[in-house]
Image: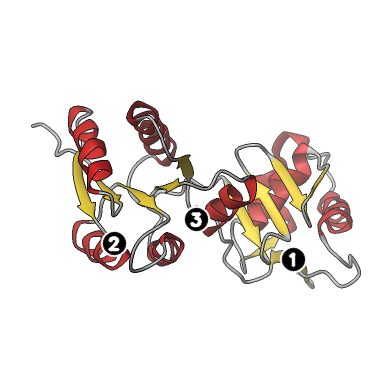
Amino acid sequence: MAKDPQRVLVVDDERKITEVVGSYLRRAGYEPLTAAGGTEALEVFERERPALVILDLMLPDLPGEDVCRRIRARSRVPIIMLTAKIEDADAVKGLCLGADDYVTKPFSPRQLMARVEAVLRRSGGIDSPAARLMCFDEEDLLIDDGLRTVRKAGREVSVTPSEFRLLRLLAGNPGRVFSREELIARALGDDFDGYDRTIDAHVKNLRQKIETDPRAPRYILTVHGVGYRFRAEEPRGPGR
């Protein structure tokens, strides 16, 4: 039995764009859904549950940023933003809101289709995490899973592979308490040297790099007698 085509919601107030993108989506085997504004987009999203959302930032009734934020609050569905803004800061802001990728206008429909395929391939389907960028405290701390980089207050900090895996695990599960044994098993793996206090050394190093005041940490918190947790705040990113 043939599978039903995946639905893709295209949100843009320019009818020509929704028609052209919809045509390319059909030829690629998807079922396009369209919305001309933010309110309509949220209604269609709730009713149809698309596999991916292509979302323009400049909408007549509700900013695309707000639409992205509301969708991300209830779903991990992949989101590709369409924007006329090309500055790096705007791209980072969109990703921090929960978008998985962005395309600047004017764009090639073929380029957009390539992005659609890539994002769906990474996500593995509806509502599965495709996190690449986690942001905290209005971009004070950024963890980029795709580039495997960490930025603090706008500057990249150097972290070891073990430190990055540990930070990614903690930050991706805010509020969850991990014992040292769990962190060893899930973050260190082959890098473990046989001493569970190795985790303490990694945490100390990470605090020096990502905390404004390592003696009064805001991000990686100690749970005495158990282990560590990342503070209980969801990352503003496309996935955890």
Between 97 and 181, the residue placed more toward the observer is 97
Is residue 240 in view? no
| Furthest residue toward left | 1
Element type at marker 1? loop
Of label 1 and label 3, which has the lower sequence position?
3
- Residue 181 x %, y %: 71, 54
Residue 109: which disc? none
Vertical relation: 222 (above or below) 159: below
Look at label 1 and name its amino acid. Tyr
- Which mark's residue is nearer the viewer, 1 or 3? 3
User: In screen coordinates, is 35 left or right of 128?
Assistant: left
Task: Name the image quarter holding residue 213.
Answer: bottom right
Q: Total label count?
A: 3
- Which mark's residue is nearer the viewer, 2 or 3? 2
Quadrant where the N terminus sits is top left
Task: Name the image quarter holding residue 28.
Answer: top left
Look at label 3 and name its amino acid. Gly
- Residue 237 x %, y %: 55, 55
- Residue 55 x %, y %: 37, 51
Q: Which residue lies under the disc numbered 1? A: 219
Q: Residue at x 68, y 67 (%)?
A: 137
Q: Which residue lies under the disc numbered 2? A: 37
Is residue 56 in view? yes
Q: Which residue lies under the disc numbered 3? A: 98
Vertical relation: 105 (above or below) 215: above
Whole-angstrom CA distance, mark 1 to mark 3, is 20 Å
Element type at marker 2? loop
User: Pointers 1 and 3 in contact (CB under 8 A)?
Assistant: no
Element type at marker 3? loop
Q: Residue at x 89, y 65 (%)?
A: 214
- Which mark's residue is nearer the viewer, 2 or 1? 2
